[in-house]
Amino acid sequence: MKYFRLFLKKLLRYLLKPISFLPALVMMYVIFNFSTQNGDVSGQLSGTVTTDLVELCGHIFDRQWDAQQIFYYAGLLEHYVRKAAHVTEYFLLAVTVAFPLYVYRLRGWKLVLSAGLFCMGFACLDEWHQSFVPGRTPALRDVFIDTAGSLAGIYVTRIVCWIGRKTIFRPLCADHLTKKPPSPGEGSQSNAGRPAQELSEDAFPFGSRLPRA
């Protein structure tokens, strides 16, 4: 039973780690799908979203705006809403890319460089793809905006993972290391012949052992 549990832990670890890239693939598909919309469809979508936001703000702040005022404010804000959408898309893409890389023990500047270059490269490909879509034009400025959103997502991921290491995995590691040692015949029977790697994997079966500082 003990070896069966160890086998299941290893199996889950090797299955779940590659699956951690699945959200990044989904996010890439979502961005690509938005880029395939022609200029009219994309403009109508952003206009609708901006109008809904203006109406929502009017209700929240109790502003009795008529349709003409709503249309006016929506026209002023639509450009910024579109750019905010760019930042949000690539923020989420960076999170979904950086977290799996973190799981695979990429840390520090290597994580920032790898995830940042990937997201920036995808942003360049996305703008190049838009050059073939009717009514859409590529813009280098959008690449910089997308990259800024990506860097924000990468650093947020690093902060969240660092907090997780300090508040979740470090106590688990401490409990495992300070566990009461087995009695003299029990330890030789349970752990005899087991390599140190397997013993450490019992405490952190999903590759989440406390990484190097």
Image (cartoon, rainbow, N blue to C red):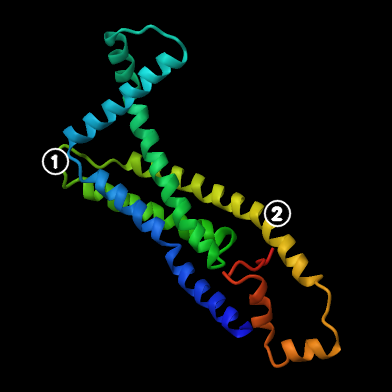
Say which of 71 and 191 sits in front: 191
x, y percentage for residue 35? 25, 45
The amino acid type of the residue labelled 2 equals Thr
As shown in the figure, which amino acid type bears the numbered disc 1? Pro
Specify the quadrant of the image occupied by residue 203. bottom right
Between 172 and 126, the residue placed more toward the observer is 172
Label 2, secondary structure: give it: helix
Residue 122's x, y, as percent?
Answer: 34, 54
Q: Residue furthest left?
A: 134
Q: Is residue 128 above or below residue 87?
A: below
Quadrant assignment, res 181: bottom right
Q: Quadrant of residue 145?
A: top left
Judged from this view, the residue extending furthest toward the right is 184
Residue appearing at x 37%, y 23% in the figure: 53
Q: Nearer the viewer, residue 180 or 52?
A: 180
Where residue 178 appears, x then y in whole percent?
Answer: 82, 70
Q: Quadrant of the C terminus?
A: bottom right
Residue located 61% across and 66% down the image: 208
Residue 152 position in % (x across, y down): 51, 44
Q: Which mark is drawn over residue 134?
A: 1
Q: What residue is shown at x 32% (from left), y 42% (from top)?
A: 140
- Relative vertical location of residue 2 with respect to residue 69 in this rendering, above or below: below
What residue does disc 2 label? 167
| Element type at mark 1 | loop
In this view, the residue farthest toward the bottom is 193
> Who comes first in sequence, dot 1 or dot 2?
1
Label 1 or label 2, whichever lies nearer to me, is: 2
Q: Residue at x 68, y 77 (%)?
A: 200
Mark 1 is surrounded, within 10 Å at the Cα level, by few (under 14), some (14 to 19) or many (20 or more) other residues, namely few
Dot 1 and dot 2 residues touching (CB under 8 Å): no
| CA–CA distance in space, label 1 to label 2 | 50 Å
Give the quadrant of the N terminus.
Answer: bottom right
